[in-house]
Image (spheres, helix red, strand yellow):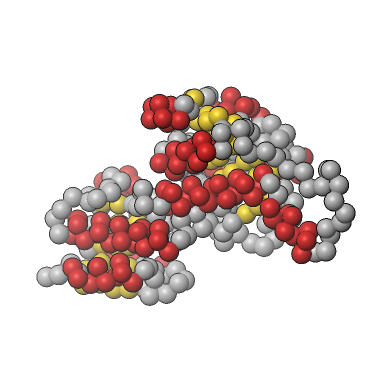
Amino acid sequence: MKKRIYIARRIPQAAVDLIAQHCDYGYWDRLEPCPREVFLAEAAQSDAVITQSVSEKIDFEFLEAAPRCKVIAQMAVGYDNVDVPACTARGVLLTNTPDVLTESTADAAWALLMAAARRVVSGHTLIQEGRWGMWHPFFQLSQDVYGTTLGIIGAGRIGGAIARRGKGFGMNILYHNRRPASELEAVLGAQYRAFDDLLREADFVVMAAPLTAQTRGLFGAREFALMKDTAVFVNIARGAVMQEKALYEALKAGRPWAAGSDVYEVEPTPASNPLFTLDNFVGTPHVGSATPRTRLAMATLAARNAIAVLSGQPAITPVN
Ligand code: DGY
């Protein structure tokens, strides 16, 4: 009997075609998420599911409902939606899509960094609103990027790619990580700092570490107060690593000087999120990997992971 894969959201067609060559499949061919009851019922009849980190929760309820499903092929690098120990205990394999989205996500972090530092959005808005008065030497002053200090929290693949871009801007690179990042040290001359020291020294603090029990709520009032009053904070990781209310208060008080974020405590974040009333905050809607090339690569890798495991081969990028 052919194995069956359930694809829980519309993905690039080439990845669906690849799946169709090897397996039977079910498909929630829509942009909006698959309702939970449909997902559970489809997963119960499938050997693998292709999931998105923002919508499909893989928990005890899922594992009980879908005992036949032995592979979770996630189309994302992050997997904070998955109870990994529970999957492992039941012999369910989780795969993710590292590497293929690294450069796009690092570009997106830099877009936020530059936009926040050089006040791109507030400049655009003031023109739009007819508030561009006569030029003067103090008009729309912002922060230099070239030759400053970049501090990366989480020096993995994405953090490393963000750091590499910093080298082109003549930046001094600091990092904080669970393990020493010897390659970054050797290639970029990056230096390790204790967490608080990095916050005190960096001109740009970029959060690129995954959401875990240790990083949940990591950036609060104390951490923002440690940053320079000229610092820019960028979050390209997950919304829950920062306390949004504390960030709002900190930005209002002017320390850090500005912030940019791609992610929020609740997504989609409402238009009423107070962060969006601030001139020194710039936000994007969780689009770090959102380019056609990268999304195709992510979908194809997720499909190849599922197909490989269902045909008895090792996963390409396993998590557990
Ligand atoms: C990821 O790959 O983890 C992105 O945040 C998309 O969910």
- Residue 124 lies, in percent from the top left, at 72, 59
Rendered-image quarter of ligand 1: bottom left
Residue at 85% across, 51% down: 135
Q: Nearer the viewer, residue 113 or 213?
A: 113
- Residue sitting farthest toward the left: 1
Residue at 56% across, 33% down: 171
Q: Nearer the viewer, residue 185 or 316?
A: 185
Residue 226 shows up from this direction:
yes
Q: Residue 308: which quarter of the image?
A: bottom left
Name the image quarter holding the N terminus.
bottom left
- Residue sitting farthest toward the bottom: 29
- Residue 137 lies, in percent from the top left, at 84, 43
Q: Nearer the viewer, residue 126 or 154?
A: 126
Residue at 14% across, 55% down: 312
- Residue 260 lies, in percent from the top left, at 62, 48
Q: Residue 157: which quarter of the image?
A: top left
Q: Nearer the viewer, residue 176 or 51?
A: 176
Up/down of 168 relative to 306, above or below:
above
Name the image quarter holding the C terminus.
top left
Residue at 71% across, 35% down: 230
- Residue 217 lies, in percent from the top left, at 56, 41
